[in-house]
Amino acid sequence: MAYWDATQNKILRQPTTRLADYPGWELVDCGCCNGLRWGGDHPRECVTCGGSGEIAHHTKSGVYAWYPGGPLCGRDPRAKAGEGR
């Protein structure tokens, strides 16, 4: 999960990791801060990752999901239409 490093004054993200039990899937840091979105009067649970801080990415189709094969939460805009079919 991404976190704020006060010594470097920047947000640090975790590296992407391949999921050995789910071929073609990798775990990507969502970019939120420990599952929370900040702003306004109080923190809110991140709607992209559901509060986990990480999302699964299907490398062939470019689809993102909360977990491999789970609820979809977007697509990589760089993925070409029709890939993975």
Image (cartoon, helix red, strand yellow):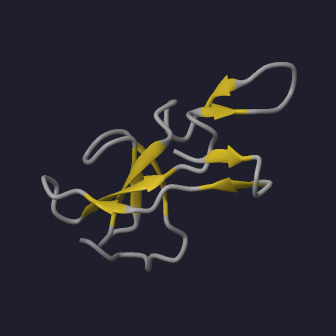
Is residue 34 found left or right of 5 in the rendered image?
left
Task: Tell me the quadrant of the picture where the C terminus can be found.
Answer: bottom left
Is residue 68 found left or right of 3 in the rendered image?
left
The image shows residue 56 at horizontal and vertical percentages of 36, 51
Looking at the image, which residue is at 62% across and 43% down? 32
Depicted 14 relative to depicted 69: above or below? below
Looking at the image, which residue sits at the far left?
21
6 or 28, which is in the foreground? Answer: 6
Depicted 67 relative to depicted 13: above or below? above
Examine the image and state in which quarter residue 47 appears: top right
Looking at the image, which residue is at 49% across and 31% down? 50
23 or 83, which is in the foreground? Answer: 23
Looking at the image, which residue is at 27% across and 72% down? 84
14 or 63, which is in the foreground? Answer: 14
The image shows residue 79 at horizontal and vertical percentages of 45, 76
Is residue 77 found left or right of 15 in the rendered image?
right
The tally of labels here is 0
